[in-house]
Image (cartoon, rainbow, N blue to C red):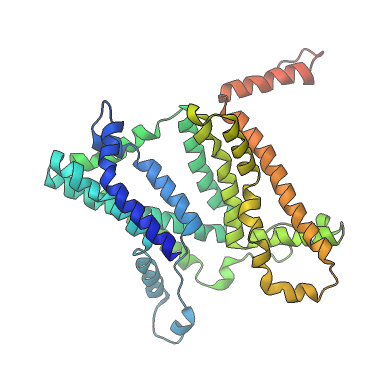
Amino acid sequence: MGLFGLYMLSMVLVLTFVLPEIFRSLAKDKTAYAMFTSVLLYYLAFDIIIRYFLQKLSTLDLQKFLLTPLKKSTIFHFSLSGSIFNFFNLLGWILLIPFAWQIIIPELGVGIGLNWILGMMAIPVISHFMAMYLKRIEVVSNFKGIFILGAMILLGFMDYMGWISIMEISEFIFSSLYSSTFTWIIFWAIAALMYIINYRLLSAYSHLDDWFSDDKSTSSFGSFNWLEQKGTTSAILANEIKLILRNKRTKSALWLSLFILFYPLIFYTNPDLNSDYWKVFIGVFISGIFMINYGQFMIAWESAGFDGLLSRNIPALQYFQAKFLLLAFSCIIMFILSILIFSFMMTSFATFCQFIIQSGNQFIFPDVGINL
C-alpha cells in the first residue's frame, strides 16, 4: 500500500505540470480555466466513488476514553477534524491548487487566484465528508446509501444521453470563483455543512445498540431458508452470501462489480477501440469481474476459520462446489445485467419505450384491439 501511495503521488505530481497544457488543447472556443471548471463536478463525483471504496473510516479506540472526563461531542469532533488530514485530501490539494499559479493568477490576477485556491481547498474536504457519510449511513440504512449512489449514476446517465449537461452546470457553479474574491466562503460553508451532517449522524448513533435494528426476528440481510433446505452445498452457499452482505470489503467488491457494468461506454464510444478483440476482453472482464475481485481472496479470507470447518461433517468436495456455484452464478447474473444495461444505453429511452409498447400490442393483445 505504501508503494501504491507513492506511485499515485508521483502520478499526481506529474499531472500538475501537464494539466494546463491538456486543458489549453481541449479548450477550443473557451479559456483553459473555463474548460477546467466545466469538469470539476466529474472530478468530485469520481473522487467520492474512489474514496467510498478505498478510504477507511476514521476510528478511535474508545475504551481509553471511558474513564476520562471527556464529552462524547469532544471525541466526535476530534475524530472528524483529525480525519481531514489524510492522503486522499493531499492528492486533491496537490492536483487542484497548482492550477491557479500556472493559469489563473497570470491571466486573472492575484486576488482571483487566491479566491480560487481557497475554494479548491474545500473541494477535497467536501468529497471526504460526503464519502464518509455514505460509508456510515450504509451501516444504518442501506436504502439511503443506495439512493445517493443511484442518484449520482442517474445524473451521469442523463448527461450521457444528452438530457442534461453536467459540464454546463459545473461551469455555472465554479465560475463564481472568478467573479468575486469572497465566493470561496460558499464552498467552505458546504464543507462545514457536510461536517455537521457527519457529526449529527455520529451523535444520533453514539451507542453500539443504535446501529442495529430492534427487530431480532429476521436477519437484516434477508432470509435464505429456501436455499439452506436444499442440501449441504446449498447451505454453505447461503452462508457465503450472508458473509458477503455482512462484510464491508466483500460488499465493496459487489458494488464495484455493478459499477463496472458501465465500463463498455469507454470502448464503444471510441472507434479505435471498437474491435472484436476488445469486445471479447470487455465481455470476459464484465461477466467475470466479481469472480476476479472476490474469487482470488475468498479462500484466504476464510483461512482463520478452517479449523472450524474441519471439525464439521462437511466434505471438502461440497465446500468447493458451493464456492464454484457462487462464482458461476455471479458470472451468469453479470452477463444478463450487462446485456440489459448495454441494450438500454445504446438506444434512447423513447425508442426503448416504443419497442415495449409495440411488443405489447403485438404479443399481449394481438386480437383484442387494445393499444397500450
| Quadrant in which residue 7 is drawn | bottom left
Kindly give the residue lying farthest to the bottom in the view shown: 67
- Give the residue at x 24% y 46%: 99
Q: Is residue 5 left or right of residue 370?
A: left
Front residue (pair 263, 57):
263
Front residue (pair 267, 193):
267
| Quadrant in which residue 90 is drawn | bottom left
Percent position (x, y) of residue 126?
36, 53
Is 180 drawn above or below residue 86 in the view shown? above
Is 64 drawn above or below residue 164 in the view shown? below
Q: How many marks?
A: 0
Q: Can residue 187 be seen?
A: no
Q: Is residue 109 left or right of residue 202?
A: left
Q: Is residue 372 left or right of residue 310?
A: left
Percent position (x, y) of residue 43?
38, 45
> Which corner quadrant holds the C terminus?
top right
Is 40 drawn above or below residue 159 in the view shown? below
Percent position (x, y) of residue 83?
38, 66
Percent position (x, y) of residue 73?
39, 72
- Give the residue at x 43% y 46%: 46
Q: Is residue 301 left or right of residue 307?
A: left
- Give the residue at x 69% y 17%: 358
- Give the residue at x 53% y 73%: 207
Q: Can residue 35 be seen?
A: yes
